[in-house]
Image: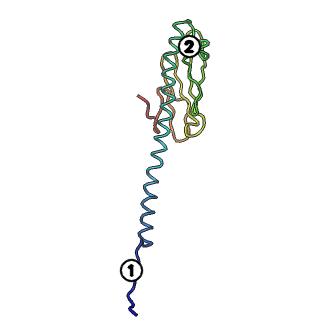
């Protein structure tokens, strides 16, 4: 009988542990970046809706000489899975349109625009900074241009 040892093939425990450690490090870096990317994309939907609604509000005023009732007109943004829209301070010459985040990663955000195009970030979740002069789309009060 020949006692030739069979050679085992596969990965050692050390190799597997190194692979797991590398995956954990990459995940720790990539997941927060991905989450921030998703939030910014969802915020962009609100910014687009508010900007479009501002144009529609001006058209409404041109036709009616008032902003009162704009929330029932064509061009007023409809609620989405991420944001609801409301109209406040509506008079013949003023309004404030608000996008309020609901559900998921946009809960806590509130953005406004008025008849003069003044943009504010009225509310933000923990870790973000609000702004009285722009729509914030990144942590650290970085604004949409």
Which residue does the image show at 60% across and 37% down from the upper left? 103
Q: Is residue 95 above or below residue 15?
A: above
Q: Nearer the viewer, residue 98 or 127?
A: 98
Which residue does the image show at 49% across and 24% down from the upper left? 119
Secondary structure at numbered mark 2: loop
Looking at this rendering, what residue extends furthest in the front direction? Answer: 1
Query: Which residue position holds label 1?
Result: 7
Please give left or right for residue 40 compared with residue 126 in the image. left
Q: Which mark is residue 132?
A: none
Give the CA distance from mark 2 to mark 1.
Answer: 82 Å
Please report whichever mark, 2 or 1, sits nearer to the chain's N-terminal start. Answer: 1
Q: Nearer the viewer, residue 9 or 63?
A: 9
Q: Residue 18 appears at what percent x and percent y?
A: 42, 66
Secondary structure at numbered mark 1: loop
Which quadrant is the N terminus positioned in?
bottom left
Q: Residue 59 appears at what percent x and percent y?
A: 50, 11
Which quadrant is the C terminus positioned in?
top left
Q: Nearer the viewer, residue 81 or 142?
A: 81
Which residue does the image show at 51% across and 23% down from the upper left? 50
Please give left or right for residue 60 compared with residue 2 in the image. right
Please give left or right for residue 137 compared with residue 99 in the image. left
On the image, which quarter does residue 87 sit in? top right
Q: Is residue 7 above or below residue 102?
A: below
Which residue does the image show at 41% across and 72% down from the upper left? 10
Query: Which residue position holds label 2?
Result: 94
Q: Is residue 28 above or below residue 101?
A: below
């Amino acid at each position: 009988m020949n006692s030739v040892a069979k050679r085992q093939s596969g990965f050692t425990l050390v190799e597997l542990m190194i692979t797991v450690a590398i995956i954990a490090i990459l995940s720790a870096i990539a997941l927060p970046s991905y989450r921030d990317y998703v939030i910014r994309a969802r915020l962009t939907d609100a910014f687009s809706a508010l900007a479009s609604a501002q144009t529609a509000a001006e058209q409404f005023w041109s036709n009616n000489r008032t902003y009162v009732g704009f929330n029932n007109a064509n061009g007023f943004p409809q609620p989405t899975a991420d944001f609801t829209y409301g109209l406040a301070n509506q008079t013949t010459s003023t309004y404030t349109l608000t996008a309020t985040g609901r559900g998921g990663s946009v809960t806590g955000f509130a953005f406004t625009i008025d008849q003069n195009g003044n943009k504010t970030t009225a509310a933000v979740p923990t870790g973000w900074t609000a702004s009285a002069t722009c729509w914030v789309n990144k942590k650290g009060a970085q604004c949409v241009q």
